[in-house]
Amino acid sequence: MARHSLQHPQNRNQHGLVKSQHPIPNKSAYAPINSQPLMATTSFCQRHRCSPPPLPLPSLCFCPCRPSPSRTLVFNHPSAKLGNWDLLFDGNRRQLGLGRNRVFARRRVITAVARAEPEHLGDDNADQEVHKGSKLSSNEDVVSEHQQKASQLKKRIVFGSGIGLSVAVVVLAGGWVFTAAVAAAVFIGAREYFELVRSRGITEGMTPPPRYVSRVCSVICALMPLVTLYRGQIDVSVTSASFFVAIALLLQRGNPRFAQLSSTMFGLFYCGYLPCFWVKLRCGLAAPALHTRIGAAWPILLGGQAHWTVGLVATLISFSSIIAADTYAFVGGKAFGRTPLTSVSPKKTWEGAIVGLGGCIATSVVLSRIFCWPKSLLSAIAFGLLNFFASVFGDLTESMIKRDAGVKDSGSLIPGHGGILDRMDSCMFTGALAYSFVKTFLPMYGV
């Protein structure tokens, strides 16, 4: 079936007239349906101003049963209105056909208008169907989003509980078990850090260190906790490692860049040096917590009362305070969060931070009453306050690195949580500050 489309721009001239595909010799290629010249078409348009019955889609096309298939209806300017449809035609040139051809002309008028403005066909029904469809689609999207959030929250709870129990067991074990666990976490965290440094978001403004330097630094960071447990001090080892890494960067092929040196030195400090204070806190403060009731009932096979040292109690309170601060801040932000805390992490709010502060201090005070350390209530409050601010700024530091890197998580090792660095960020500065607080501000380690 031959179809004469009125909507393709290549079939129109510069005045908007439809060009006939079968031009008549020695005549204009732009022909009306009936070439007989008649009077103006105003009366015809007024006569057919009523709304026509709805046409099925198959009727919106030309058919061979209609005469003069090569002739195409000519519309140029708006001069009449047919119900809700605007008619476009040139009224000062030709008149629509009368008699037998008038029915076909009218059908073709409707066909042309329907093709030109299909959105006006059945406006009420179409709008209702579109509204229903969009509403149904939006409801499905909302349900899918809620299901995804519920699944994500379930993963966070399950794996978070597993991590908490594992940390408790490792902390209670102490010694080489605790140190080896810290070294393994440091190695994975260092690898994630140097991958963030090599990401596209950060490398746009700097040159990342070579891969072999990143791998060597990750190994050095993992060895630092082991050296701390063996020697008790890490300052000389960190200084020596930094010196040799700087030499390797300066002697590399190409042009050494200061950005390479600064990112590498910060990685050694952030991922290697800071976590060593957890080893010093847990294993270095060996003074017994004499008033701890749990220690008095602790089995002899597991070390007895001597196993409960100041370092063990301080480590348990610090880790518990960090978890409480993170949990209370998350719940408080979801329930009351309105004011953003900082642009570094837009999801954190002042309301959530205040709730997290209260939860952290309350956890520190409650555990201090349970473990009978520290004895002073003011010392317990100060210890909880210190743990809160150290965890918050550690979290914001890692958020700043991820923001510059253009990523949401540092890795995907822990489902629902991200990478190791996403879980260790709150602990980076906390160990160093907790160790300094106990050593400096608590006489006799708070016993």
Image (cartoon, rainbow, N blue to C red):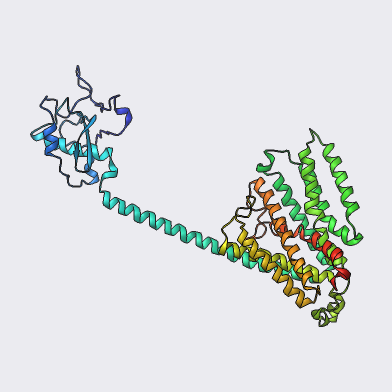
Q: Residue 429 in the image: state x and y as whole percent.
A: 77, 57
Residue drawn at x 88%, y 55% is: 234
Quadrant of the image for the C terminus? bottom right
The image shows residue 121, relative to residue 312, as above or below, that is above
Q: Residue 205 in the image: state x and y as whole percent.
A: 69, 38
Determine the image quadrant of residue 353.
bottom right
Q: Residue 164 in the image: state x and y as whole percent.
A: 70, 68
Residue drawn at x 86%, y 40% is: 247
The number of discs equals: 0
The image shows residue 282, relative to residue 397, as above or below, that is below
Can residue 80 be seen in this snapshot? yes
Determine the image quadrant of residue 419.
bottom right
Q: Residue furthest front?
A: 378
Viewer-closest of 364 and 194: 364
The image shows residue 446, relative to residue 241, as above or below, that is below
Can residue 176 be seen in this snapshot? no
- 121 sits left or right of 356 in the view: left
Viewer-closest of 331 and 230: 331
Q: Residue 250 in the image: state x and y as whole percent.
A: 84, 37
Viewer-closest of 205 and 165: 205
